[in-house]
Amino acid sequence: MAKKDQTWTQEEIDKIPDVAKKYKTRAEFSKNDPRTVRKARSLGIWDDITKHMKHGKAEIPESEIRKAAAKCESSGDFNQKHPNMYQKAARLKILQELFPDTYVPNPPKSPRKRWTEDMIREEAKKYSTRSDFKRGSEYAYARSGALGIRDEVCAHMP
């Protein structure tokens, strides 16, 4: 196709569908000829010229995941060697089954603490200066300001 600095001629535009036929996937087309892809999208012909191409990610059969996992010593090893298969196994919730001795699921995250006025008052009592309070309990300190009670909860501090 034309160089980056040049504008597209009608002849080049007419050749875009022929260029697209050289590729089997959209990803391959995008990687190897991004300028033509951009032009096809801007002309609104992208879907038409890529109908023959495979769309989306290749589906990994569970049997292939199990074969690859059997060759790995641990779930971490599996994740390093086959990250896409690891992610698919995680979505299928079969990692524990594949690696019963080494897989440790991530514990659920605890809910975020929402500082109430009472909780802030109790937290502030632990500190003797405002700077210690700010360093030691940043979120409680910030929330006390947002609630407009900072001076009150820090009254015992110099």
Image (cartoon, rainbow, N blue to C red):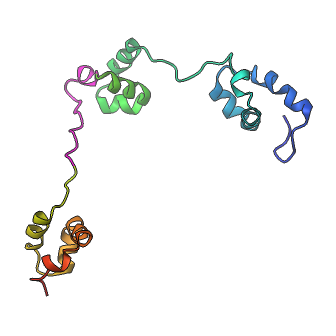
| Residue 66 in magenta stretch | no
User: x%, y% of residue 125?
Assistant: 8, 73
Which residue: 39% across, 33% down? 80
The x, y position of residue 150, in whole percent, is: 19, 76
Q: Where is residue 54 in the image (x, y as percent from the top left)?
A: 61, 18
Q: What stretch is highlighted in magenta?
A: 94-111
Judging depth in this view, the residue of 92 and 141 nearest the camera is: 141
Residue in front for this viewpoint, 61 or 14? 14
Horizontal placement of 125 versus 99: left or right? left
Compared with 19, 33 (above or below) is: below
Whether residue 100 is in magenta: the answer is: yes
Choose between 46 and 99: the one closer to the eye. 46
Magenta segment, principal secondary structure? loop
Give residue 111's position: percent from left, percent from top.
20, 47
Q: Which residue lies furthest to the front in this view?
A: 148
Picture quarter with the N terminus? top right
- Nearest to the observer: residue 49 or residue 107: 49
In the rendered image, the residue lying farthest to the top is 63
Among the 4 quarters of the image, the one containing residue 6: top right
The answer to which image quadrant residue 3 occupies is top right
Left or right: 113 in relation to 54: left
**Residue at image location 21% in from the left, 39% down from the top:** 108
Quarter-wise, where is residue 64 in the image? top left
Q: Quadrant of the C terminus?
A: bottom left
Name which residue lies at 91% across and 33% down.
Answer: 10
Q: Is residue 67 left or right of residue 131?
A: right
